[in-house]
Image (cartoon, helix red, strand yellow):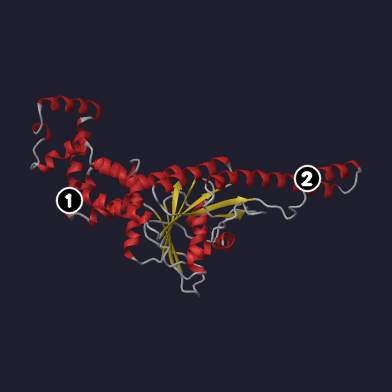
Amino acid sequence: MAEVSTQRLDVDGLLADPSTRIVVCCGAGGVGKTTTAAALGVRAAEVHGRRTVVLTIDPARRLAQSMGLSELDNTPRQVKGIDGDNGGELHAMMLDMKRTFDEVVQQHTTPQRASEIFANPFYQAMSSTFAGTQEYMAMEKLGQLRATDEWDLIVVDTPPSRSALDFLDAPARLSRFLDGRMLRMLLAPARTGGRSMFSLVTASFGLFSRTVQKVLGAQLLTDLSGFVAALDSMFGGFRQRADQTYRILQDPQTAFLLVAAPERDAVREAAYFAERLVAERMPLAGLVLNRMHRTEVPGLPADASLAAAEALTAAGDQPLAADALRIHANLVRQTDREQRVAATFIDAFPGVPTVSVTAQPADVHDVDGLRTIGSLLA
């Protein structure tokens, strides 16, 4: 198959470079992003001797299955069966957003205050189900992994593309929340000795507060106020760490890899994400095109192949050869269609290096399969 881009992505060069400390894989769902992240981790450990950890934010269990692990959790687990002759190791983990939130609370407040926070119903809901918590905690976990300086390389497998954009937006969203008017009102009791916030404001706000209680319910408002007061001393640290991690993502030590399949929606998502990375001045290293098809006889066009098949059929001769020619024609057409779809991204971003991975006959489900994908990537 002809290359879809004149500028090929040098995956081995990227993984071998000691200045590359973080690789973030992002893209639409169902394009092989998790497999790509795992294959990069295997190759970095085995071929380039790097102590590597793969962090998945995708709640699916595909990463654990492909690495032969029964489960993944918030603690890096070493992957067995990795060739360590070059001195590398591979670990894998899956973000547990509630446990990460709990760890942050425990690290940055007193045991008594932590107990109050954990018992608060609003915290229990927010740490488990609130939109945006997963992405912010992903930033926290990535910052923790980078701060330990234990890993030569961190490979991040993000959720599908728009959720990955939430991953980038987490610091700004948190800052907007912390600076919001409602939050400052809820913080008023804690910052004035615990007096009722409704006694601290004007009568006009009393009317507003009653309206809020009707909408939210008095108990929820009480839980929320208690939650905000308990976390008050930690908010500055939340923002600071999120901003630090955001700056790490902008640093040349980080490389973003877009992962797409040769399908219009997937390539459109990749282009959308590329535009965002460029706008945010984040280092876009390249595009991985998964599941590309190819033919071993590129010089035989589809029309000629079909004409030959029809001639054989009309002559009543060599039916197997006629079937093979028809299969070849379909494959050529599919290959051409995939090339055209891929070209829409390449034309829009001609400076972005690209690498193609040929479609495999079966899903990857073990380390050997990941090695194969890693070789194709390189």
Determine which of the numbered discs, if any, sits on residue 326 in the image.
2
Residue 309 x/y as whole percent: 83, 44
Quadrant location of the C terminus in the rendered image: bottom right
Determine which of the numbered discs, if any, sits on residue 113 in the image.
1
The residue at 28%/55% (across/down) is: 103
The residue at 18%/26% (across/down) is: 208
Does residue 347 appear left or right of residue 73 in this picture? right
Residue type, mark 2 in image: Arg
Quadrant location of the N terminus in the rendered image: bottom right
Determine which of the numbered discs, if any, sits on residue 361 in the image.
none
Measured along the vertical axis of the image, is residue 314 above or below residue 111?
above
Residue 43 x/y as whole percent: 52, 65
Badge 1 local density, few (<14 within 10 Å), some, or many (20+)?
A: some
Q: Which quadrant of the view contains residue 202?
A: top left
Residue 37 x/y as whole percent: 49, 56
Q: Which quadrant of the view contains residue 91?
A: bottom left
Residue type, mark 1 in image: Arg
Does residue 265 appear left or right of residue 228 in this picture? right
Structural distance between the alpha carbons of marks 1 and 2: 71 Å
- Which residue in the rendered view is the most extreme toward the right? 315
